[in-house]
Image (cartoon, helix red, strand yellow):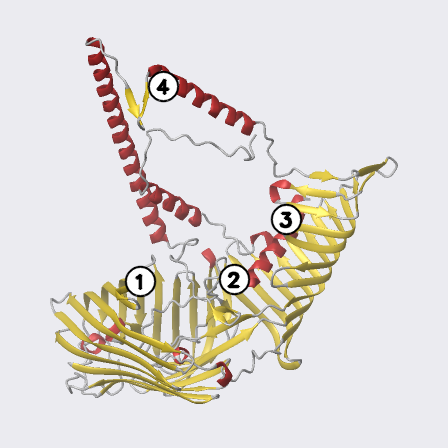
C-alpha cells in the first residue's frame, strides 16, 4: 500500500512544481568559457534554455556549481577542508577547556586566599551577586527544566514508515465476505509520508488484502491532490488501479481515463497534460561576433510568430515515456504529430532525450549538422547511449566535405562537468579533439587537437596538441567609485603543454616551429565603469568604462611573453543602431617559441568593433572586427578579426548566419522562443518507470557539501559557553 501510493504521488508532486519554472533552469549548461569575441562552434549549436515568467527574464544563478553531483577534485577538496576544520575545532575546544580549567583553578586559589584571611568571597556575573548556595539552586532548577523537557518529548509515539491511520464515523464488518467498510468521511493517512486518501466510502478485504475507495476519491501528497472516481490498491502485489483521474497543479493539469501501477511502473491511458500559464522558454545558441540580444527593442516593433497572444501548441502522441533510472531521467515520444494554432507543423516518428538528475545538460537522438574549421561541413544521425554517473555518449556516423567528400564518425561525451567532442573524417583527413573537464567552480582542464580554444583576451587559438589546467575567477564590487560605477576584476592562471601547429588564421605568413613545450601564464583584467545611462523608452544607451589587461608567460624553453594594454570601452545604442567599441594602447615583449599558436597579433594600437543595425522586423545585420592600427602585427594583417552576421526571421524564431573571414568558418545559429501557455500533450499511453526517482539524485555529494558548509559556518561563530546543551523540539517525533 505504502509503496504504491508513494509511487503514484511522487510522479504528480514532482512533475507539477517542475513545470512551474519559478527559477531559471539551464537544461543544457554551456561548458564553453566565452568572451565577447569569437569562438569555435561545436558540432551543433549548444542551446542554453532559460525560462521567462510574464515576460520578465529571471537571471538568478546558483552561487556555486556542482552543489549536488560534484567532480572528484571538488569532493576531495571539501573532505580535506572539512577534516582540517574539524581538527582545528578540536584543537580550539581543547584550548578553551584548558583555559577554563586554568580559570577555575585560579578562582579556587582566590577563594582559598579569601578564606585564609577570614573574608567572604562573592562572584559577580551580569552585575548580580551570587554565592555558592544561589549557584547550586540555579543549577538544580536548570536540571529540573531540562528533565521536564525530555519527559514531554519522550512520551511522543513515532510515526513509522509502515504505519497507516484510518479515521471515519462508522465501520461495518461483513463476516461472510470478510469486508470491512468505512463510511462517514473516511480518511486514510500515512503520516510518515504525508499522504492522505479520502473518499465517500472505503472497503478493505482482509483475505485478499485489497483496499477500495469509492466515490469522490482524493489522493493528496505534499498539498498536491489527485482526483478520481475509484481506486483499488492490492497490498499483496503493491499495485494500484484508478480511473477518471485528474491532477491540478499551479502550472499543469493532468487527466486520464485510468492509471495502473505495478511495482515501479505507472501507466496512464487515454490522457492529456495541459497548461495555461505563461512560461517562455528561450533557446539561445552560442553567439558569435555581435550579441544581438543586447539590443533594446520596443514591444510594438517586435514581430512574433510562435509566441503571439493566441498562440497554442498541441502534441498528439501514441506513446510517451519517462524512465527515471539511478543516474538519468529519460524522456521519449513515439508517433507524435505537432500542431501550432491547429495547423500541422511536422511529424515526429520517434524522439528520446537524456538528462541527469540536476538537469545540468541535455542530449537527444537528433541529427547533427554543421561546419568547423579545417574539418569542413558534416552531417549525420545521432545515437545516444547512457554512460556511468549520469553522463551520456553520443555516436554520430557522418559524411564530411572539405576538399572532397568523405566519411567519418564523431563522439560527444557529456556529464554535469565534462563536455568532450571527438571527430574524424576522410574528406579532410583531420583528427579533431575538443573538450573541457571542470574540476571545481573555478578550476578546469581543457584539451584539444586541431580545434580553436579560448585564450581569453588574446583570442581563439589552435594548437596541434593542447592540454591545459586553468584557474579562472572573477569578482565584482558594486558602486566602487560611486553609485552605478562598479569595478570588475578577473584573473586567470594556467599551466599548459602545447605543440605549435601549422594553422591559426587564413593566409598568415608565420612559420611553425613545431616545438612542443610547457607554458605557465597569468592574466588579469580590471574593468572600471565610469558612466552608464540606459533609456529603454527612446531606445538609447551609453556605457563607458576603462579597461586594463595584462598577461605574463614563461615557457619550458626559457622564453617569455609579456603583454600589457589599457584603453576605454564603449557600448552605445541609438534607435536601432548598436555598437561596441574598445581601443587599446599596448606594450609587449613577445618571444614565444610557438609563434603560430600563441604569438601576440594585435599590435601596439588596436581597436575592436562590434556593429549591429536592425533593418526591419525580419532582418538585423552585424559586423565584428579587430583592427591593428599601428601596422606592427606579426602576421602582416590589418584585420585580426573580421566577421559578418545576418539575423533573419521574426523575433521569436531567428536564424543567424555568419562567416568568419580570418578562420574560414561558417556559422549557423538559431535563437528560438517557445511559450508553454495553451500547450497540450495528448497521449494514448504514458508509461513512467521509477517515478519516485524522478529528479532525485542517489549520491551523497550534496550531504557532504552541506556538512562542510555547516562546519565552515561553525568556525565563524563565537562560542560564548564552555558547554552547549541542545534542547530538542518537544513536538519532534521520537520513540
Q: Relative to 115, does residue 232 appear above or below in the rendering?
A: below
Secondary structure under tag 1 reads strand
The mark closer to the camera, 2 or 4, is 4
Q: Relative to 227, does residue 559 appear above or below in the rendering?
A: below
Cα distance between the residues tagged 3 and 1: 42 Å
Question: Residue 135: which numbered mark, if any?
Answer: 4
Q: Residues within 10 Å of mark 2 (few under 14, many from 20)?
A: few
Circle 1 is placed at which residue position? Answer: 445
Sequence-wise first label, 4 or 1: 4
Question: Residue, x 35% and y 65% (percent of image)?
Answer: 436
Q: Relative to 354, does residue 86 appear above or below in the rendering?
A: above
Please state the total of marks drawn on the protein image: 4
Question: Residue, x 19% and y 67% (percent of image)?
Answer: 517
The mark closer to the camera, 4 or 1, is 4
Sequence-wise first label, 2 or 3: 3
Task: Look at the image and tell me in which quarter the N terminus lies.
Answer: top right
Circle 2 is placed at which residue position? Answer: 22
Circle 3 is placed at which residue position? Answer: 6
Q: Relative to 241, does residue 467 appear above or below in the rendering?
A: below
Question: Residue, x 60% and y 59% (percent of image)?
Answer: 16
Amino acid at each position: 500500500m505504502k509503496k504504491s501510493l508513494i509511487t503514484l504521488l511522487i510522479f504528480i508532486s514532482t512533475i507539477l512544481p517542475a513545470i512551474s519554472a519559478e527559477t531559471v533552469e539551464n537544461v543544457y549548461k554551456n561548458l564553453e568559457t566565452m568572451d565577447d569575441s569569437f569562438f569555435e562552434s561545436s558540432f551543433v549549436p549548444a542551446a542554453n534554455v532559460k525560462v521567462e515568467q510574464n515576460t520578465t527574464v529571471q537571471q538568478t544563478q546558483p552561487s556555486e556549481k556542482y552543489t549536488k553531483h560534484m567532480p572528484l577534485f571538488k569532493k576531495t577538496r571539501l573532505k580535506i577542508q572539512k577534516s582540517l576544520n574539524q581538527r582545528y575545532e578540536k584543537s580550539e575546544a581543547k584550548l578553551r577547556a584548558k583555559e577554563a580549567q586554568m580559570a577555575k583553578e585560579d578562582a579556587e586559589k582566590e577563594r582559598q586566599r579569601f578564606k585564609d584571611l577570614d573574608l567572604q568571597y562573592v562572584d559577580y556575573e551580569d552585575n548580580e551577586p551570587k554565592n555558592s548556595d544561589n549557584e547550586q539552586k540555579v543549577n538544580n532548577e536548570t536540571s529540573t527544566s531540562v528533565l521536564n523537557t525530555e519527559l514531554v518529548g519522550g512520551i511522543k509515539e513515532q510515526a513509522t514508515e509502515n504505519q497507516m491511520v484510518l479515521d471515519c464515523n462508522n465501520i461495518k464488518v461483513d463476516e461472510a465476505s470478510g469486508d470491512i467498510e468505512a463510511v462517514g468521511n473516511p480518511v486514510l493517512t500515512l503520516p510518515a509520508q504525508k499522504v492522505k486518501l479520502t473518499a465517500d466510502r472505503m472497503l478493505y478485504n482482509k483475505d485478499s488484502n485489497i483496499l477500495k475507495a469509492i466515490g469522490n476519491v482524493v489522493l493528496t501528497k505534499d498539498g498536491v491532490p489527485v482526483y478520481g472516481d475509484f481506486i483499488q490498491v492490492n497490498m499483496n502485489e503493491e499495485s494500484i488501479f484508478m480511473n477518471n483521474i485528474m491532477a491540478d497543479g499551479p502550472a499543469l493539469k493532468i487527466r486520464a481515463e485510468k492509471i495502473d501501477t505495478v511495482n515501479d511502473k505507472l501507466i496512464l491511458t487515454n490522457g492529456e497534460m495541459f497548461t495555461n500559464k505563461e512560461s517562455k522558454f528561450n533557446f539561445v545558441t552560442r553567439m558569435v561576433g555581435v550579441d544581438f540580444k543586447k539590443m533594446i527593442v520596443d514591444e510594438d516593433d517586435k514581430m512574433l510568430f510562435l509566441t503571439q497572444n493566441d498562440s497554442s501548441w498541441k502534441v498528439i502522441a501514441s506513446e510517451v515515456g519517462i524512465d527515471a533510472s539511478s543516474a538519468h531521467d529519460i524522456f521519449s515520444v513515439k508517433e507524435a504529430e505537432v500542431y501550432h494554432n491547429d495547423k500541422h507543423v511536422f511529424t515526429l516518428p520517434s524522439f528520446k532525450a537524456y538528462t541527469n538528475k540536476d538537469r545540468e545538460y541535455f542530449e537527444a537522438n537528433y541529427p547533427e549538422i554543421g561546419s568547423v574549421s579545417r574539418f569542413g561541413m558534416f552531417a549525420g544521425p545521432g545515437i545516444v547511449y547512457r554512460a556511468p554517473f549520469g553522463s551520456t555518449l553520443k555516436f554520430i556516423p557522418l559524411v564530411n566535405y572539405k576538399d572532397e567528400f568523405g566519411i567519418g564518425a564523431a563522439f560527444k561525451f557529456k556529464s554535469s562537468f565534462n563536455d568532450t567532442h571527438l571527430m574524424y573524417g576522410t574528406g579532410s583527413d583531420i583528427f579533431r579533439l575538443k573538450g573541457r573537464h571542470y574540476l571545481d567552480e573555478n578550476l578546469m582542464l581543457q584539451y584539444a587537437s586541431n580545434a580553436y580554444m579560448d585564450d581569453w583576451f588574446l583570442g581563439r587559438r589552435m594548437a596541434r596538441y593542447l592540454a591545459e589546467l586553468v584557474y579562472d575567477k572573477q569578482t565584482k564590487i558594486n558602486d566602487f567609485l560611486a553609485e552605478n560605477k562598479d569595478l570588475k576584476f578577473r584573473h586567470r592562471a594556467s599551466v599548459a603543454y602545447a605543440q605549435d601547429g601549422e594553422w591559426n588564421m587564413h593566409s598568415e605568413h608565420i612559420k611553425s616551429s613545431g616545438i612542443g613545450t610547457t607554458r605557465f601564464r597569468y592574466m588579469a583584467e580590471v574593468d572600471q565603469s565610469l558612466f552608464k545611462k540606459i533609456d529603454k523608452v527612446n531606445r538609447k544607451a551609453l556605457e563607458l568604462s576603462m579597461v586594463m589587461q595584462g598577461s605574463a608567460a614563461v615557457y619550458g624553453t626559457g622564453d617569455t611573453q609579456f603583454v600589457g594594454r589599457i584603453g576605454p570601452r564603449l557600448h552605445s545604442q541609438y534607435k536601432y543602431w548598436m555598437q561596441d567599441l574598445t581601443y587599446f594602447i599596448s606594450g609587449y615583449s613577445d618571444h614565444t617559441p610557438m609563434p603560430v599558436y600563441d604569438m601576440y597579433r594585435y599590435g601596439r594600437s588596436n581597436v575592436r568593433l562590434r556593429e549591429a543595425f536592425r533593418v526591419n522586423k525580419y532582418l538585423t545585420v552585424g559586423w565584428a572586427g579587430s583592427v591593428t592600427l599601428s601596422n606592427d602585427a606579426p602576421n602582416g594583417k590589418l584585420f585580426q578579426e573580421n566577421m559578418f552576421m545576418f539575423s533573419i526571421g521574426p523575433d521569436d524564431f531567428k536564424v543567424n548566419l555568419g562567416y568568419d573571414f580570418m578562420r574560414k568558418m561558417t556559422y549557423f545559429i538559431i535563437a528560438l522562443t517557445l511559450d508553454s501557455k495553451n500547450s497540450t500533450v495528448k497521449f494514448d499511453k504514458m508509461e513512467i518507470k521509477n517515478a519516485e526517482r524522478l529528479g532525485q539524485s542517489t549520491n551523497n555529494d550534496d550531504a557532504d557539501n552541506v556538512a562542510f558548509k555547516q562546519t565552515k559556518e561553525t568556525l565563524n561563530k563565537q562560542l560564548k559557553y564552555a558547554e552547549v546543551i541542545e534542547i530538542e523540539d518537544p513536538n519532534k517525533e521520537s520513540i
